[in-house]
Protein backbone atom coordinates (compact mmCIF):
# COMPACT_ATOMS: atom_id res chain seq x y z
CA UNK A 1 0.00 0.00 0.00
CA UNK A 2 1.52 3.35 -1.05
CA UNK A 3 1.24 6.65 0.80
CA UNK A 4 -1.72 7.79 -1.32
CA UNK A 5 -3.69 4.66 -0.39
CA UNK A 6 -2.83 5.23 3.26
CA UNK A 7 -4.15 8.80 3.06
CA UNK A 8 -7.36 7.61 1.38
CA UNK A 9 -7.85 5.09 4.19
CA UNK A 10 -7.44 7.91 6.70
CA UNK A 11 -10.07 9.89 4.77
CA UNK A 12 -12.44 6.92 4.93
CA UNK A 13 -12.01 6.63 8.68
CA UNK A 14 -12.67 10.34 9.17
CA UNK A 15 -15.82 10.09 7.06
CA UNK A 16 -17.07 7.06 8.99
CA UNK A 17 -16.59 8.90 12.30
CA UNK A 18 -19.16 11.52 11.25
CA UNK A 19 -22.89 11.39 11.83
CA UNK A 20 -24.00 10.58 8.29
CA UNK A 21 -27.59 11.68 8.82
CA UNK A 22 -26.32 15.12 9.83
CA UNK A 23 -24.15 15.30 6.70
CA UNK A 24 -27.12 14.35 4.54
CA UNK A 25 -29.30 17.07 6.06
CA UNK A 26 -26.51 19.63 6.12
CA UNK A 27 -25.71 19.40 2.40
CA UNK A 28 -29.18 18.26 1.26
CA UNK A 29 -27.89 15.02 -0.22
CA UNK A 30 -29.78 12.03 -1.56
CA UNK A 31 -29.22 8.81 0.34
CA UNK A 32 -30.49 5.30 0.94
CA UNK A 33 -29.51 2.63 3.43
CA UNK A 34 -26.28 1.77 1.61
CA UNK A 35 -25.04 4.96 -0.04
CA UNK A 36 -24.89 8.75 0.08
CA UNK A 37 -25.14 10.35 -3.37
CA UNK A 38 -23.79 13.59 -4.80
CA UNK A 39 -22.62 14.97 -8.11
CA UNK A 40 -18.91 15.74 -8.45
CA UNK A 41 -17.84 17.71 -11.53
CA UNK A 42 -20.97 16.65 -13.38
CA UNK A 43 -20.35 12.98 -12.61
CA UNK A 44 -22.70 10.95 -10.37
CA UNK A 45 -20.84 9.87 -7.26
CA UNK A 46 -21.73 7.81 -4.21
CA UNK A 47 -20.13 6.93 -0.89
CA UNK A 48 -20.60 3.55 0.75
CA UNK A 49 -22.07 4.16 4.19
CA UNK A 50 -20.46 1.03 5.63
CA UNK A 51 -16.84 1.25 4.44
CA UNK A 52 -16.57 4.85 3.18
CA UNK A 53 -15.53 3.86 -0.34
CA UNK A 54 -16.17 6.36 -3.15
CA UNK A 55 -17.57 5.28 -6.52
CA UNK A 56 -18.29 7.16 -9.76
CA UNK A 57 -20.88 6.25 -12.38
CA UNK A 58 -19.47 5.69 -15.86
CA UNK A 59 -20.68 3.79 -18.93
CA UNK A 60 -23.73 2.42 -17.17
CA UNK A 61 -21.97 1.07 -14.10
CA UNK A 62 -20.64 2.19 -10.71
CA UNK A 63 -16.84 1.99 -10.50
CA UNK A 64 -14.51 2.27 -7.55
CA UNK A 65 -12.84 5.69 -7.72
CA UNK A 66 -9.05 5.41 -7.58
CA UNK A 67 -8.32 9.11 -8.04
CA UNK A 68 -6.64 10.38 -4.88
CA UNK A 69 -7.54 13.99 -5.69
CA UNK A 70 -11.21 13.18 -6.26
CA UNK A 71 -11.62 11.04 -3.15
CA UNK A 72 -9.82 13.43 -0.80
CA UNK A 73 -11.75 16.43 -2.15
CA UNK A 74 -15.09 14.67 -1.64
CA UNK A 75 -14.22 13.67 1.92
CA UNK A 76 -12.99 17.15 2.80
CA UNK A 77 -16.00 18.96 1.34
CA UNK A 78 -18.30 16.76 3.41
CA UNK A 79 -16.32 16.50 6.64
CA UNK A 80 -14.20 19.63 7.12
CA UNK A 81 -16.88 22.05 8.28
CA UNK A 82 -18.03 21.29 11.82
CA UNK A 83 -21.20 23.37 12.05
CA UNK A 84 -24.75 22.03 11.94
CA UNK A 85 -25.66 24.07 8.85
CA UNK A 86 -23.63 24.24 5.67
CA UNK A 87 -21.37 27.29 5.37
CA UNK A 88 -22.66 30.10 3.17
CA UNK A 89 -21.12 31.18 -0.10
CA UNK A 90 -20.36 34.90 -0.43
CA UNK A 91 -20.49 35.10 -4.22
CA UNK A 92 -17.20 37.01 -4.10
CA UNK A 93 -14.36 35.46 -6.09
CA UNK A 94 -10.75 35.71 -4.93
CA UNK A 95 -7.32 34.17 -5.41
CA UNK A 96 -6.37 31.29 -3.14
CA UNK A 97 -3.90 33.46 -1.22
CA UNK A 98 -6.73 35.63 0.08
CA UNK A 99 -7.74 33.14 2.73
CA UNK A 100 -4.29 31.77 3.62
CA UNK A 101 -2.09 33.47 6.18
CA UNK A 102 1.08 31.45 5.65
CA UNK A 103 2.41 28.80 3.30
CA UNK A 104 2.71 28.46 -0.47
CA UNK A 105 -0.08 30.34 -2.21
CA UNK A 106 1.29 30.83 -5.73
CA UNK A 107 -0.09 28.18 -8.09
CA UNK A 108 1.23 29.79 -11.28
CA UNK A 109 3.97 27.20 -11.81
CA UNK A 110 1.35 24.44 -11.75
CA UNK A 111 -1.20 26.20 -13.97
CA UNK A 112 1.40 27.23 -16.59
CA UNK A 113 1.56 23.63 -17.81
CA UNK A 114 -2.17 23.49 -18.46
CA UNK A 115 -2.28 27.01 -19.90
CA UNK A 116 0.23 25.86 -22.52
CA UNK A 117 -1.84 22.74 -23.27
CA UNK A 118 -5.05 24.78 -23.68
CA UNK A 119 -3.47 27.60 -25.71
CA UNK A 120 -4.83 27.90 -29.26
CA UNK A 121 -7.63 25.43 -28.49
CA UNK A 122 -10.25 27.77 -27.10
CA UNK A 123 -13.26 26.08 -28.72
CA UNK A 124 -12.09 22.67 -27.50
CA UNK A 125 -11.61 24.06 -24.01
CA UNK A 126 -15.09 25.56 -23.99
CA UNK A 127 -16.57 22.22 -25.04
CA UNK A 128 -14.58 20.42 -22.33
CA UNK A 129 -15.78 22.91 -19.72
CA UNK A 130 -19.39 22.33 -20.69
CA UNK A 131 -18.94 18.54 -20.67
CA UNK A 132 -17.89 18.84 -17.01
CA UNK A 133 -20.98 20.88 -16.23
CA UNK A 134 -19.24 24.25 -16.43
CA UNK A 135 -21.39 27.29 -17.18
CA UNK A 136 -19.70 29.89 -19.38
CA UNK A 137 -19.81 33.37 -17.88
CA UNK A 138 -19.51 36.88 -19.32
CA UNK A 139 -15.82 37.79 -19.80
CA UNK A 140 -14.01 38.95 -16.67
CA UNK A 141 -10.75 40.92 -16.61
CA UNK A 142 -10.35 40.50 -20.37
CA UNK A 143 -10.19 36.70 -20.17
CA UNK A 144 -10.94 34.74 -23.33
CA UNK A 145 -12.89 32.23 -21.26
CA UNK A 146 -14.59 32.50 -17.89
CA UNK A 147 -16.41 29.42 -16.63
CA UNK A 148 -18.08 28.52 -13.34
CA UNK A 149 -17.96 24.88 -12.25
CA UNK A 150 -20.19 23.28 -9.67
CA UNK A 151 -17.63 20.98 -8.11
CA UNK A 152 -20.54 19.72 -6.03
CA UNK A 153 -24.05 21.22 -5.92
CA UNK A 154 -22.97 23.28 -2.90
CA UNK A 155 -19.42 24.35 -3.86
CA UNK A 156 -18.29 26.16 -7.05
CA UNK A 157 -14.97 27.35 -8.50
CA UNK A 158 -14.34 29.83 -11.31
CA UNK A 159 -11.84 29.26 -14.10
CA UNK A 160 -10.37 32.05 -16.22
CA UNK A 161 -8.18 31.55 -19.30
CA UNK A 162 -6.29 34.00 -21.49
CA UNK A 163 -4.82 32.80 -24.78
CA UNK A 164 -1.22 33.73 -25.52
CA UNK A 165 -0.16 36.33 -28.08
CA UNK A 166 3.02 38.01 -29.31
CA UNK A 167 3.43 39.90 -26.05
CA UNK A 168 2.10 37.60 -23.32
CA UNK A 169 2.12 33.85 -22.69
CA UNK A 170 -1.18 32.04 -22.08
CA UNK A 171 -2.51 32.36 -18.55
CA UNK A 172 -4.90 30.29 -16.46
CA UNK A 173 -6.37 31.10 -13.04
CA UNK A 174 -8.78 29.47 -10.65
CA UNK A 175 -10.76 31.76 -8.38
CA UNK A 176 -12.43 30.70 -5.16
CA UNK A 177 -15.36 31.92 -3.12
CA UNK A 178 -14.15 34.10 -0.26
CA UNK A 179 -15.57 31.54 2.19
CA UNK A 180 -13.67 28.61 0.69
CA UNK A 181 -11.71 28.13 3.89
CA UNK A 182 -15.02 27.29 5.59
CA UNK A 183 -15.57 24.39 3.16
CA UNK A 184 -12.18 22.68 2.93
CA UNK A 185 -8.54 22.70 3.97
CA UNK A 186 -6.19 24.91 2.01
CA UNK A 187 -4.20 21.86 0.88
CA UNK A 188 -7.34 20.39 -0.67
CA UNK A 189 -7.64 23.34 -3.06
CA UNK A 190 -4.54 21.94 -4.79
CA UNK A 191 -6.10 18.48 -5.08
CA UNK A 192 -9.29 20.00 -6.49
CA UNK A 193 -7.43 22.28 -8.89
CA UNK A 194 -5.35 19.43 -10.27
CA UNK A 195 -8.39 17.17 -10.57
CA UNK A 196 -10.39 19.77 -12.53
CA UNK A 197 -7.56 20.68 -14.92
CA UNK A 198 -6.64 17.07 -15.57
CA UNK A 199 -10.29 16.23 -16.33
CA UNK A 200 -10.46 19.14 -18.76
CA UNK A 201 -7.28 17.94 -20.47
CA UNK A 202 -8.68 14.40 -20.73
CA UNK A 203 -11.95 15.72 -22.18
CA UNK A 204 -10.03 17.62 -24.85
CA UNK A 205 -8.00 14.50 -25.67
CA UNK A 206 -11.11 12.33 -25.80
CA UNK A 207 -9.83 10.06 -23.04
CA UNK A 208 -12.01 11.21 -20.13
CA UNK A 209 -13.58 8.30 -18.28
CA UNK A 210 -14.20 8.50 -14.52
CA UNK A 211 -12.78 5.46 -12.79
Image: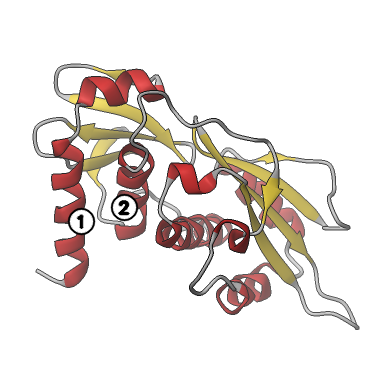
Q: Residue furthest bottom?
A: 166
Callout 1 environment at 10 Å: few (<14), some (14 to 19), or many (20+)?
many
| Residue placed under numbered mark 1 in the picture | 8
Instruction: Provide residue 78's location: percent of width, then percent of height.
Output: 34, 37
- Quarter assignment of residue 63: top left
- Does label 1 or label 2 sit earlier along the sequence? 1
Q: Quadrant of the N terminus?
A: bottom left
Instruction: Provide residue 18's location: percent of width, then percent of height.
Output: 19, 33
Residue 211 showing in the rendered view:
no
Task: Identify the residue at horizontal 55%, vertical 75% (top origin).
Answer: 110
Left/right of residue 189 with respect to residue 177 in the rendered view: left
| Residue placed under numbered mark 2 in the picture | 72
Task: Identify the residue at horizontal 20%, vertical 40% (top origin).
Answer: 15
| Up-down relation of residue 17 to residue 144 (above or below) | above
- Quarter assignment of residue 52: top left
Q: CA distance from mark 1 to mark 2?
A: 7 Å
> Pointer 1 and pointer 2: residues touching (CB < 8 Å)?
yes
| Between 103 and 208, the one nearer to me in the picture | 103
Instruction: Provide residue 181's location: percent of width, then percent of height.
Output: 49, 49
Amino acid sequence: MDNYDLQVDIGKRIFLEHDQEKLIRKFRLEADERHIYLTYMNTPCRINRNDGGVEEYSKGAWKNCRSFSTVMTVYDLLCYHQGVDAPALTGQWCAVGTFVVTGVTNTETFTKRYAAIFDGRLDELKAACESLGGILQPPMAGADLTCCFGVTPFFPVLLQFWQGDDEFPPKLMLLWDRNTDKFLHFETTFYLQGDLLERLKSCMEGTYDPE
